[in-house]
Amino acid sequence: YKLRTFQTELLIRIDSEFGVEETLQDIRSISGVTVVTALDSLFRKDSGTYLSHIRIKYHPRSDAVTGKTFMKDHLLPTIRSNEIPGCKVIRTVSQPEQIA
């Protein structure tokens, strides 16, 4: 039994009313996600938002699902949904890479 683990980095914008740590907790609750780390966060007074560079580690449940497919079909749509309020994906900083 081998667990395939992938990681990717995203740049996200978080509304200040939701907060960075609360939003990272919400992202951690996505099924398949194992670790979420804030690499850098910057508060923007003009827009009242945080700009956060985050690293997400995850493992797709099915061996048939690639890291890229999991990200495109599950991870990004969930982050963009109402499940993660006040969060917007600005861009993908690094494509999914297999780390284990």
Image (cartoon, rainbow, N blue to C red):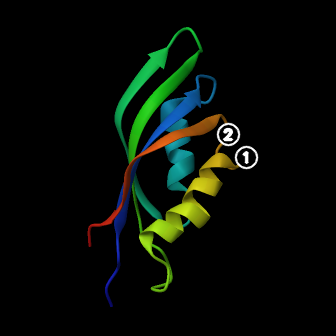
Callout 1, which amino acid? Asn
Q: Which residue in the structure is indicated by mark 2?
A: 85
Q: Residue at x 35, y 77 (%)?
A: 4
- Contact, CB < 8 Å: mark 2 with mark 1? yes
Residue located farthest toward the bottom when viewing the structure as drawn: 1
Query: For residue 34, which quarter of the picture?
Result: bottom left
Q: Which residue in the structure is indicated by mark 1?
A: 82
Task: Depth check: give the residue in front, 27 or 91.
Answer: 91
Q: Residue at x 56, y 66 (%)?
A: 31
Q: Specify the quadrant that holds the C terminus.
A: bottom left
Q: Residue at x 56, y 31 (%)?
A: 14
What x and y, as percent, mark residue 59?
42, 71
Q: Is residue 35 left or right of residue 62?
A: left
Q: Residues within 10 Å of mark 2 (few under 14, many from 20)?
A: some
Residue located farthest toward the right when viewing the structure as drawn: 82
The image shows residue 13, relative to residue 96, as above or below, that is above
